[in-house]
Image (cartoon, grey):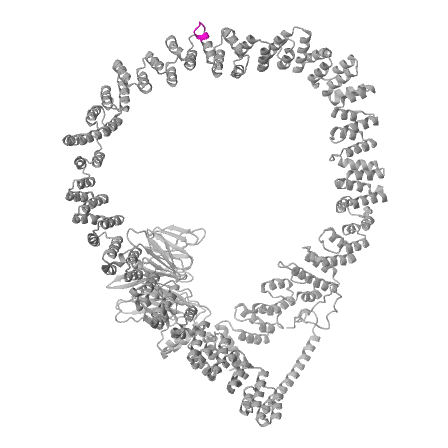
């Protein structure tokens, strides 16, 4: 390594100015760096721009995150996407940018002058007076906690840092201030435990820890640096000293500052915990590295020309990251490969180099450590040598050889042996490696001090291994288990768990490690000692969530081989609980073993229905042998077996329940056969079960077949109970009938009565006949059937014929009194005596008899008078049924017993019923009934049929119902005229009720009968009557006349006076009777309304004017004026308005008169209007009239006088209509400079217009004045206006278009150039000037771009240059816009105009699109091949080498890039190697080709070798042989070597092959060609691969004994040594086996050092059990420990 290599790695991670961050935003107050993850910058490009926060993620390819945040300060979390924001110096907010939520917030009572993250959870806040800590992620949210008050010495200081140690017991606040011409540092150090502060002069500080040699714990230190006026010091002091640690002496060393850095001072300090190195950064950009323990200076150099204002440690605490004012993000860390050699250059730093190398495991000092170790070992200083070995970098001296050297050393002075001292030193240093742990473990166990191993294991000082566990096994199995577990030796862990009885831990361990032992054999060995544990373990294996881990059949074999039925049962019950089809044979085995040995267990298993896939025929047979008849039936389908066992109902469990359910499994025929067998075998015993089965399966078996079955055995009882259970649900009439028969046979009359009453599905005729034939003593069932199905006549006839009068009374009294009318009818039909009928009626409650039915039945037989006594008695009893009165009315009508009185006075009868009854008998009686019941339609129809129109008219007027009136007045009514005549002539004159008459009138009106209505109204009004002065009727008469008889209306107007004039007049207008309406208003002296009729309806303005002159009323004149104005008789209208003195309609008058040009008349009207009103519209119109009449003096006088005119609006209107002089007067009076300027332009007074525009200062005005000046070529004035326009970016495009449209290009350029010097010059001006120059003066564009590129809008200017074909200027813009891709493409596409090699090389290195690299290479290949190598050298780190090679090989141009290929061949890519090899073959450069093939192996060796072996030069064929040898194609390689007589290569190849057949073939070849030298060389080079017999054969056959003798002598000697060694080893093995056998014979089988399951196959293993599945248990494969 070069001696001048520096000990640090220095890298620029990022340039912030290349990431859209402005240089002004890079500073202490706006740029923060809390860790090497994020940089946070607050930026506002200009004062008016919105501020934003830019976050750079250094760990994610420098990703940029922008957020529009306005804050005083922003700091990112160390590694989370969490940002802390400070606003107004007191408001603090924490946001999670990833989740987009606010985490916490707080408002401080003091300004926060400095803050930073001091831990992943907390912020340190320094205010003017105090220091706070705030845990921002704590839940629930908390407020900042005050830690301590600031020292007075920090007053006036700028706080630049705040540090907290790892346990938050010490804090330090660092500040700086100007003092005596220098920057002084002040620091406050605070102890939280002691609650005291100390003021220290310091510029930078940090906390750290270090492990001193021999110390049990870390030492906490505090380091700080200060530069005073006299000196500069670095201090390292201990804090929180621990008694167990050695004291750390305070360190204070001088800090070197160069002579030119007079004002330099420390600004930042970080401690690398990885290397225990202090990094100190100064203001002038110097980096200082100091050893933390000794404070010795390691390195010092300048890394930045600008101030590094913020730093942070990197993630692994190996270096620091900082940002300087240029925006460079710099990273500095120790270079592990160079720091030790760098320190060793100075002999004084040797101890420091050794200590640093040991502490951080750095390379470079291994030789020194090895030399010291050897020297100490040679001098007998074993303790120091042990320390050297323990502290050696990366532990390179801690090898088995070193351990062996210490092991062989004798003890010194009777103390610990060097061996133990060595291990003690290693333990003090840290954990031991595998070999050291094994050696120390054996040593301690031999001394029976296993507690030390336990202690070291707990301290993680030992590396566990299988060998260490084997060593501990004889002493402590539990300890061995712990070691095996840590060493991850699964089979030993399982064996140890079994040995220690921790069976339940085996399965979790297996799942955790994935190791799969032979579980079946493991279970066998466990069962032999503990069957219960074995069963539990087997169950756990079978029930694994990922499927069974063991073959269940093998486990059952294990249990059965030990005759363990109960554990086997428990295991199978658990293992087979899923009831899978593939487990059928196991289910059969389980049931078999229990049916034979424990039938009750089998019965329970079958009873729980756990299994479905066992051999049911086999199990059924075994169940029958075990007398488990119920289980037989459950598991067989053999009909004979079923019939044989099903009749034993007394032997079944719960026969009534189970047996009933069992029949659900049988077919219909099987069920019937079984039921038949049960009744046939023992009907008494099985009848109950049979009818229960029949009941449940009645639907499927069929009721008829079951009835036949019961009838077959003549069991009425069974039939009764069976049918009784289904009859309520059956809809089969036969079932119900059979049940009635069975119930009758069983004397169950009550049940027969219930069925007859409630059932709806029997055949009533059949049941009636059966009951009549049955001659029951109680006739109630028959009565119920006949009543329900209306067999009343048959019932009465049957009872009457059998003299069952009592039963008839029972029927009508108790069963159904409502049937009494039909019973009476039946008795009348059989000519029963009337006395019997009357007595029967007297015995029944009249309230329960339907009187209507009774009357109907009796009336139909013409015996109605028979009911008179019954009806009168019913009324007398208080019964008020309407039917009773109806019946009495009918009787009185038929008997003519004063019916009119009854009908008029009685209100209880039904008028409709009685009226219908009377219609044919007496219409007058019907009229009385209908009128009483208001049966309108019936009455109308009856009176029409009988021509009773007078009665109908009176009824209609009396009812006063509009619906009835509508009905009778309908045009379809042929009787309407007759009825109307009677209404007019009779009903209405007789009426004295106005309301009813009004209803009649409205009905006539609704029926659209105007003639009849007029006739009616004249009858009422014109003739003397109570309604003559009724206003409503007069209105109605006139309205009707207006519609039906207009000629009579004028007569009515003069004749009547009570009508509503307004209403009638409006009606007349609506129907076009305008003269009648005018006459009404005139009669009522309503002149305004009359005038309205004349003006608006008759439309006669002249008549209206005459009428106005006659009445002379202002209101009338106003209406006439409005009409004249609408008729455009403007002069007359104005005259009428003046006569009315009405200015109310001034807006319309002004508008119409102005449009008509009646300005003089309008002036008169406006002067009249101003007398009473001061309205802006009036004054404005008057002023504008003066303007239009050119009465400018009157206008000026008017404007100077008091007025409310809208002068600006008048001026605008005058301007629009071209009255510019008047407009000038208007605008001058109100000082409206903007509009005055525009007016002056039209008056061609440009100078005055510019002056007014300057006073107005309006863009619109400037624009108008500018356009006018340009049009008149007043370019000087136009430029003045233009300069005020171009500062507004939105006006610039239109201004440019204006000049370009007129061809004033130079004037436009002059204007834009003049504008560049303005204070308000903006980017669009610079851009526009550049665009204009590109169009009209392209030679000046580059100069403009070089001067103002930073203030130009790049995209717009780029587009302009493209359109103008200004290629150099375009590339210049692309480069300054960081559009390197487009710059490169433009240079390639326009190479003739814009390409330049050095510029292109600089540009291409910065492009982002990788495809451009390859386009550039193609461009150079085609146009600049001589410079291609230079370009490739610049692009090598960025391009894909394989693609480049393929691209050039495709065009056969790869010789051009040979230097590039050689340069990148170190990457060992196949494409590169193949290309180079091809070139070298073409160039016949075999030396370089040999180096390429040997050093770079990534190529198609077969293809290359096949090409080279055919080459004409032997050197290339030799390379082919080497390739074959390298790829183990021994025969091919040797064949090529033999072909070219390169026998040395052939011998080397044969030796490398390690194949005896290859070697012997070559050996025989040399013998055959007689090459004795090669023969001897083969014997030497391939000694281990040549068989002795082959050498002896060849020597004997070819006389080569002398040449072979050295080989044979050496071979015999080696053979003798080997046999001697084997003999010695065999004797030692026999002695060891004899000793082990003796120990084993004396050790009990149980309780010894080994479990039986670990002993493997032995003579004590029981003979294999005869397995049903044919699988013999296999040994587990475990071996003894």
Residue 140 in sight here: yes
Q: Residue at x 72, y 15 (%)?
A: 860
In the foreground, 1511 or 216: 1511
Residue 414 in sight here: no
Query: x, y (%) of residue 1661?
Result: 72, 70
Residue 530, image quadrant: bottom right
Question: Vertical placement of 1211 versus 1481: above or below?
Answer: above
Question: Vertical placement of 1652 versus 108: above or below?
Answer: below
Q: Is residue 1021 magenta?
A: yes
Query: x, y (%) of residue 1642?
Result: 70, 75
Question: Vertical placement of 159 versus 917: above or below?
Answer: below
Magenta-drawn segment: 1018-1025
Label tally: 0
In the foreground, 909 or 157: 909
Query: x, y (%) of residue 1258?
Result: 22, 44
Quarter of the rendering occupied by the N terminus: bottom left
In the foreground, 819 or 1600: 1600
Query: x, y (%) of residue 1367?
Result: 29, 61
Residue 800, image quadrant: top right
The extreme left residue here reads: 1193
Q: Is residue 852 left or right of residue 1257?
A: right
Q: Is residue 977 magenta?
A: no
Quarter of the rendering occupied by the C terminus: bottom right
Q: Residue at x 56, y 69 (%)?
A: 487
In the foreground, 170 or 341: 341
């Amino acid at each position: 390594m070069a001696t001048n290599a520096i000990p640090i790695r220095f890298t620029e991670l990022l340039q912030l100015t290349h990431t859209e961050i402005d240089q002004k935003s890079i500073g202490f107050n706006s740029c923060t760096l809390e860790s090497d993850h994020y940089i946070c910058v607050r930026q506002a490009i200009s004062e008016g721009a919105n501020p934003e926060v830019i976050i750079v993620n250094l760990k994610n390819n420098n990703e940029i995150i922008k957020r529009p945040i306005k804050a005083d300060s922003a700091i990112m979390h160390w590694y989370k996407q969490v940002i802390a924001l400070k606003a107004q110096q007191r408001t603090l907010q924490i946001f999670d940018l990833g989740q987009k939520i606010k985490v916490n917030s707080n408002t401080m009572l003091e300004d926060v002058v400095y803050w930073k993250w001091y831990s992943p959870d907390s912020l340190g806040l320094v205010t003017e007076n105090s220091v706070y800590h705030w845990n921002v992620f704590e839940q629930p949210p908390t407020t900042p906690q005050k830690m301590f008050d600031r020292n007075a010495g920090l007053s006036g200081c700028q706080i630049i840092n705040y540090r907290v140690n790892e346990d938050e017991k010490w804090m330090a606040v660092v500040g700086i201030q100007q003092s005596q011409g220098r920057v002084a540092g002040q620091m406050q150090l605070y102890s939280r435990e002691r609650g005291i502060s100390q003021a220290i002069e310091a510029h930078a500080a940090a906390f750290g820890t270090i492990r001193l040699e021999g110390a049990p714990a870390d030492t906490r230190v505090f380091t700080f640096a200060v530069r005073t006026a006299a000196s500069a010091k670095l201090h390292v002091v201990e804090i929180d000293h621990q008694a167990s640690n050695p004291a750390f002496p305070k360190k204070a060393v001088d800090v070197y500052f160069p002579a030119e850095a007079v004002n330099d001072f420390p600004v930042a300090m970080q401690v690398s915990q990885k290397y225990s190195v202090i990094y100190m950064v100064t203001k002038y950009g110097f980096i200082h590295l100091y050893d933390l323990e000794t404070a010795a200076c390691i390195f010092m150099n300048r890394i930045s020309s600008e101030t590094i204002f913020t730093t942070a440690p990197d993630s692994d605490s190996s270096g620091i990251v900082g940002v300087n004012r240029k925006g460079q993000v710099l990273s500095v860390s120790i270079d592990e490969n160079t720091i030790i050699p760098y320190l060793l250059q100075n002999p004084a730093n040797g101890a420091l180099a050794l200590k640093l190398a040991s502490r951080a495991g750095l390379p470079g000092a291994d030789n020194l450590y090895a030399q010291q170790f050897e020297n100490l070992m040679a001098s007998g200083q074993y303790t120091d040598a042990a320390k050297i070995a323990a502290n050696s970098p990366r532990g390179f001296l801690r090898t088995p050889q070193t351990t062996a050297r210490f092991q062989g050393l004798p003890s010194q002075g009777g103390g610990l042996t060097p061996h133990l001292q060595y291990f003690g030193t290693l333990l003090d240093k840290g954990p031991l490696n595998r070999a050291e742990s094994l050696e120390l473990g054996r040593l301690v166990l031999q001394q029976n001090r296993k507690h030390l191993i336990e202690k070291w294991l707990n301290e993680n000082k030992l590396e566990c291994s299988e060998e260490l566990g084997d060593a501990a096994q004889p002493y402590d199995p539990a300890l061995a288990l712990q070691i095996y577990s840590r060493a991850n030796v699964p089979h030993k862990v399982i064996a140890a768990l079994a040995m220690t009885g921790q069976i339940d831990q085996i399965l979790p361990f297996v799942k955790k490690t994935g190791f799969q032992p032979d579980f079946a054999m493991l279970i066998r060995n466990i069962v032999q000692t503990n069957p219960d544990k074995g069963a539990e373990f087997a169950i756990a294996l079978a029930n694994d969530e990922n499927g069974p881990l063991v073959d269940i059949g093998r486990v059952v074999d294990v249990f059965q081989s030990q005759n363990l039925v109960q554990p086997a049962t428990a295991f199978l019950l658990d293992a087979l609980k899923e009831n899978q089809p593939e487990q059928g044979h196991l289910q059969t085995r389980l049931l078999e073993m229990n049916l034979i040995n424990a039938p009750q267990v089998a019965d329970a298993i079958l009873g729980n229905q756990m299994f479905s896939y066992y051999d049911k025929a086999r199990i059924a047979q075994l169940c029958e042998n075990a007398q488990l008849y119920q289980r037989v039936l459950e598991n067989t389908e053999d009909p004979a077996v079923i019939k044989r066992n099903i009749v034993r109902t007394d032997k079944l469990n719960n026969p009534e329940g189970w047996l009933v359910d069992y029949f659900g499994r049988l077919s219909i025929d099987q069920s019937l056969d079984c039921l038949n067998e049960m009744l046939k075998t023992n009907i008494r015993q099985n009848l109950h079960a049979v009818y229960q089965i029949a009941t449940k399966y009645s639907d499927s078996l069929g009721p008829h077949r079951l009835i036949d079955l019961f009838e077959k055995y003549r069991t009425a009882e069974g039939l009764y109970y069976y049918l009784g259970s289904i009859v309520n649900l059956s809809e089969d009439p036969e079932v119900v009938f059979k049940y009635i028969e069975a119930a009758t046979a069983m004397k169950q009359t009550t049940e027969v009565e219930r069925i007859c009453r409630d059932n709806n599905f029997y055949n009533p005729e059949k049941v009636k006949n059966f009951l009549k034939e049955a001659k029951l003593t109680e006739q109630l069932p028959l009565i119920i059937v006949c009543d329900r199905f209306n067999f009343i006549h048959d019932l009465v006839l049957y009872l009457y014929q059998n003299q069952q009068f009592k039963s008839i009374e029972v029927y009508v009294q108790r069963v159904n009194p409502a049937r009494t009318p039909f019973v009476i009818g039946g008795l009348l039909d059989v000519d029963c005596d009337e006395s019997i009928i009357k007595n029967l009626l007297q015995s029944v409650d009249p309230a329960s008899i339907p009187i209507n039915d009774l009357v109907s039945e009796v009336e139909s037989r013409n015996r109605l008078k028979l009911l008179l006594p019954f009806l009168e008695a019913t009324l007398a009893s208080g019964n008020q049924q309407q039917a009773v009165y109806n019946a009495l009315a009918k009787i009185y009508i038929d008997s003519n017993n004063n019916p009119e009185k009854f009908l008029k006075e009685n209100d209880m009868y039904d008028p409709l019923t009685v009226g219908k009854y009377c219609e044919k008998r007496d219409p007058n009686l019907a009229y009385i009934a209908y009128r009483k019941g208001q049966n309108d339609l019936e009455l109308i129809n009856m009176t029409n049929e009988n021509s009773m129109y007078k009665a109908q008219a009176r009824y209609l007027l009396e009812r006063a119902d509009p619906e009835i009136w509508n009905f009778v007045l309908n045009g379809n009514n042929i009787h309407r005229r007759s009825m109307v005549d009677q209404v007019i002539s009779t009903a209405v004159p007789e009426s004295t009720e106005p309301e009813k008459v009004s209803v009649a009138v409205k009905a006539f009106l609704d029926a659209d009968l105007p003639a009849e209505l007029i006739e009616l109204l004249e009858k009422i009004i014109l003739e003397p009557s109570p309604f003559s002065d009724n206003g409503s009727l007069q209105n109605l008469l006139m309205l009707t006349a207006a519609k039906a008889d207009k000629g009579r209306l004028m007569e009515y107007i003069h004749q009547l006076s009570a009508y509503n004039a307004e209403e009638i007049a409006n009606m007349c207008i609506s129907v076009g009777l305008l003269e009648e309406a005018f006459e009404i208003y005139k009669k009522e002296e309503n002149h305004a309304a009359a005038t309205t009729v004349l003006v608006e309806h008759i439309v006669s303005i002249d008549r209206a004017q005459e009428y106005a002159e006659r009445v002379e009323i202002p209101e009338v004149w106003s209406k006439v004026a409005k009409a004249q104005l609408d008729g455009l008789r403007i002069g007359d209208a104005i005259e009428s308005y003046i006569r009315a003195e009405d200015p109310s309609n001034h807006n319309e008058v002004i508008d119409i008169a102005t449009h008509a040009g009646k300005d003089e008349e309008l002036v008169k009207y406006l002067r009249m209007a101003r007398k009473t009103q001061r309205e802006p519209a009036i004054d404005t119109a008057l002023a504008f009239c003066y303007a239009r009449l050119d009465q400018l003096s009157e206008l000026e006088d008017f404007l100077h006088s008091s007025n409310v005119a809208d002068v600006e609006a008048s001026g605008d209107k005058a301007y629009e209509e071209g009255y510019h002089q008047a407009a000038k007067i208007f605008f001058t009076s109100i000082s409206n400079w903007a509009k005055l300027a525009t007016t002056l332009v039209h008056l061609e007074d440009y100078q005055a217009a510019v002056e007014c525009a300057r006073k107005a200062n309006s863009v619109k005005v400037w624009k108008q004045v500018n356009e006018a000046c340009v049009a008149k070529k007043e370019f000087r004035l136009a430029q003045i206006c233009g300069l005020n326009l171009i500062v507004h970016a939105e006006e610039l495009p239109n201004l440019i278009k204006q000049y370009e449209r007129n061809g004033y290009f130079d004037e436009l350029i002059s204007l834009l150039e003049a504008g560049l010097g303005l204070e308000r010059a903006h980017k669009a001006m610079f851009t526009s000037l550049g665009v204009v120059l590109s169009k009209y003066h392209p030679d000046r564009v580059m100069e403009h771009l070089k001067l103002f590129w930073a203030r130009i809008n790049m995209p717009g200017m780029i587009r302009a240059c493209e359109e103008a074909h200004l290629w150099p200027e375009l590339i210049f813009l692309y480069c300054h816009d960081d559009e390197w891709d487009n710059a490169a493409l433009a240079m390639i596409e326009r190479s003739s105009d814009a390409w330049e090699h050095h510029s292109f090389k600089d540009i291409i290195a910065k492009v982002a699109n990788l495809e451009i690299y390859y386009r550039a290479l193609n461009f150079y290949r085609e146009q600049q091949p001589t410079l291609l190598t230079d370009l490739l050298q610049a692009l090598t780190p960025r391009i894909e080498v394989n693609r480049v090679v393929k691209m050039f090989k495709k065009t056969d141009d790869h010789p051009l890039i040979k230097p590039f290929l050689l340069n990148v061949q170190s990457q060992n890519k196949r494409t590169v190697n193949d290309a180079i090899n091809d070139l070298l073959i073409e160039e016949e450069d075999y030396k370089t080709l040999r180096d390429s093939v040997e050093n770079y192996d990534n190529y198609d060796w077969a293809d290359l070798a096949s090409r080279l072996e055919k080459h004409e030069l032997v050197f290339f064929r030799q390379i082919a042989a080497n390739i074959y040898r390298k790829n183990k194609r021994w025969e091919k390689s040797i064949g090529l070597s033999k072909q070219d007589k390169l026998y040395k290569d052939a011998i080397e190849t044969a030796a490398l092959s390690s194949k005896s057949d290859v070697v012997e073939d070559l050996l025989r070849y040399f013998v055959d060609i007689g090459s004795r030298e090669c023969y001897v060389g083969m014997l030497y080079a391939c000694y281990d691969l040549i068989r002795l017999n082959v050498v002896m054969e060849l020597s004997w056959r070819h006389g080569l004994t002398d040449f072979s003798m050295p080989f044979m002598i050496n071979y015999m000697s080696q053979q003798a040594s080997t046999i001697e060694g084997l003999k010695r080893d065999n004797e030692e093995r026999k002695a060891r086996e004899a000793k082990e056998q003796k120990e084993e014979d004396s050790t009990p089988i149980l309780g010894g050092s080994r479990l039986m399951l670990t002993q493997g196959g032995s003579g004590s293993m029981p003979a294999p059990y005869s397995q049903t599945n044919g699988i013999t248990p296999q040994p587990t494969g475990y071996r003894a420990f």
